[in-house]
Image (tube, helix red, strand yellow):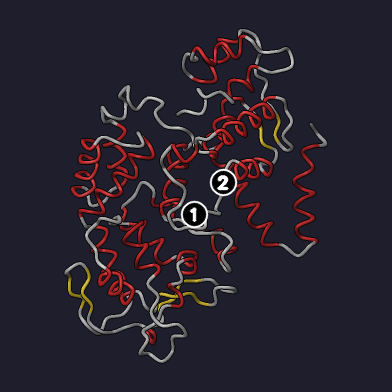
Amino acid sequence: STSATSEPSAIRRKLMRYGKPHEVVATDLMEAKLQRAVYSERQLEDVLTDFWFNHFNVFLDKGADRYLVTSYERDAIRPHVLGKFRDLLAATAQHPAMLFYLDNWQSADPNSGRGKRGLNENYARELMELHTLGVDGGYTQKDVTEVARCFTGWTILQPFRVGEFRFQKNIHDKGEKTVLGVRIPAGGGQEDGEKVLDILAHHPSTARFLSRQLAQRFVADNPPESLINRMAATFRKKDGDLREVMNTMLSSPEFWSQGAWRAKVKSPLEMVLSAVRASGADMESAFVLTQKIAELGQPLYRKVEPTGYPNTSEDWVNSASLLGRMNLALALAGNKLPGIKAGNVPEGDAEALAKALLFTTPSDETRKAILAKTNTTPVTGLVLGSPDFQRR
């Protein structure tokens, strides 16, 4: 409806009027993400960008990150999703959004006399536990401390004004360090942190951990060990070439197996995006969809914990979530979402329409539901809200 589409603009004006320009920035960021996801012709790149942002998660609402996150996905993540992992790792390590989120910008050699808070281990711990080796990757608390020492001085030039990476040598710990058995000589500078990134990017545990994460996102909640082993072998052989790792996974018999077919439940983001694309809806504004995704439990860029959102299905399956998805599907099909123009989906043969939306034959449960529909309930809404559509 024409009047409904003006609502998001009105909300944006109110945010500016009440002194919340950062919320306008956040809104624009989220809307741009959905617009790209729906209309981009590079769908794999877009899905991988979401995957790697989630892997290197930062929280939008933490201080300066309200503005620093706006370039994080664009500059640190997207250019490297099909490149070398070492480059992706370095881009996230140096980006001000990550430095601010995990407090490394305040980390300093306690003996320098210049650091306000001394050594901060937050980034060092998450770098190994979540970004590279995995929790069982073979590191110790001593390694965490040594890695944190290597990254002292990796900071931000005026995070609330300039927001650029800066190495501050006068707060860097110049002493000797040992990380995972590798000696890093005394007297170093920024290259101490670079050496850590080299060690972690080429560690066998990293190859295996990342392969499992990718397979869990794209194949199954419990991916076959045979597939993980082959992906990890490719990672090591090809020097962390993520394109080659993806080729190994996408061409594998496990990826195309019956056990992997529709084995995953869509996240709220995936469900909303696929519903818009499948129904042919047009987005004049994606504002209302960002709100709906948040209501379903996945507020964009706002996962507080560095773990990111889960790759497994069980976290997205509950009765409240399924009801919310059904209501969203009916609203989309009924042209009741402000800023979203419903697609011209023919409501003829119900079973044929269901098959077209699902790209497969509907289950008996879904078939019975659409055949028993009332005259006021569009088939499109029933299909998009069905358990069948929640799987990918």
Count up the numbered dots.
Answer: 2
* Residue picked out by circle 1: 73
Q: CA distance from mark 1 to mark 2?
A: 10 Å
Q: Hey, what amino acid is under mark 2?
A: Lys
Of the pair 41 and 188, the residue shown nearer to us: 188
Residue 247 seen in the current view:
yes
* Residue picked out by circle 2: 33
Is residue 300 found left or right of 209 in the rendered image?
Answer: right
Tell me the quarter of the picture where residue 4 sits.
top right
User: Does residue 315 sit above or below 264 in this rendering?
Assistant: below
Of the pair 71 and 294, the residue shown nearer to us: 294
Q: What residue lies at 43% left-to-right and 72% top-to-bottom?
A: 104
Q: What residue lies at 63% left-to-right and 20% top-to-bottom?
A: 380
Number of residues whose C-alpha sits closer than 10 Å to that of mark 2, classed few (under 14), some (14–19) or many (20 or more): some
Of the pair 50 and 263, the residue shown nearer to us: 263
Q: What residue lies at 36% left-to-right and 84% top-to-bottom?
A: 109
Q: Quadrant of the N terminus?
A: top right
Q: Give percent across and percent down for residue 116.
A: 47, 85
User: Does residue 57 sit above or below 95 in this rendering?
Assistant: above
Disc assigned to residue 154: none
Residue 78 seen in the current view:
no
Is residue 371 found left or right of 131 in the rendered image?
Answer: right
User: Does residue 379 sit above or below 115 in this rendering?
Assistant: above
Tell me the quarter of the picture where residue 344 sits.
top right
Of the numbered discs 1 and 2, the one sitting upstream in the chain is 2
Would you say the residues marked 1 and 2 are in contact, meaning their CB atoms lie under 8 Å apart?
Answer: yes
The residue sitting at the bottom extreme is 113
